[in-house]
Amino acid sequence: MMNDLTVGKPEAVLWKFCMPLFGSIVFQQLYNIADSFVAGKFIGENALAAVGNSYEITLIFIAFAFGCNMGCSVIVSQFFGARRYENMKTAVYTAMITSAMICIVLMVCGLLFCDSLLGMINTPEELLGDSKIYLDIYILGLPFVFFYNIATGIFSALGDSKTPFYFLAASSTSNIAVDILFVTVFHMGVAGVAWATFLCQGVSCVLAVFVVFRRLKGIETDRIPLFSFDILKRIMTVAVPSILQ
């Protein structure tokens, strides 16, 4: 589904587009809320503190993923609106390749310097073990975070804010059930909370990327380059300020 946001009453079009975005923000926060609730309710106070403590570091990774989302969304929407579909597809592939490279660098840095990062935020000794477990598993799931954000950016660029909302709503609510299952039935502790998030985000990411490519396949174009430095510069012009913000 691709929507032309220039057709219809501006107020109605904008509200119809924005409401799923508002909902997505709520469900995005539900991931951390669910992890914290399950950890505190079924594991203990230290587990709750460890999850909350790790969240301070995961925000850094989320900032990079969100920046890639913004850069991809803005540039792809410009090409889509101008009906320059070859450039639009090249922008999609350029954004995905660049995001993959950034993700790999962040994963390597995160896994190598996890202890140092936790030390920099003065993590108490009794929380260090659980915080490291949660953070390590979260870092392993970074590709899902990055590519889901790229997919949602493409959906938005094509005028569709509902599809990513549905994926996120289903994923974040199912995360609650999987959290409880892993912690209360399989007794996996903080690792269970982290693996539940990993699994639910992974399924959501794979489905979102699959749907994106199906829709792009429906737009017929000539053969296109998979990467463009000129388009990369345009993407980074938007992405870098978003990351810093």
Image: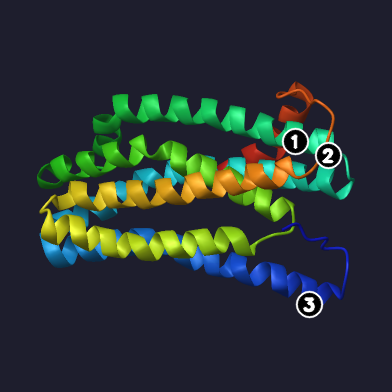
Q: Residue at x 43, y 30 (%)?
A: 106
In this figure, which residue is indicated by the disc labeled 3? 12
Secondary structure under tag 3 reads helix
Q: How much space separates mark 2 and mark 3, taking CA atoms?
A: 27 Å
Front tag of 2 and 3: 2
Q: As rendered, which of 66 and 200 lies closer to the eye?
A: 200
Q: Position of residue 57 (x, y in %)?
A: 36, 43
Mark 1 lies on a secondary structure that is helix
Residue to which mark 1 is pinned? 89
Is 221 on the left or on the right of 245, as rendered? Answer: right
On the rendered structure, is 35 left or right of 128? right
Q: Is residue 114 above or below residue 76?
A: above
What amino acid is at disc 3?
Answer: Ala
Q: Residue at x 16, y 57 (%)?
A: 183
Badge number at residue 85: 2
Residue closest to the eye, 113 or 65: 65
Question: In this rendering, does residue 28 appear at all?
Answer: yes
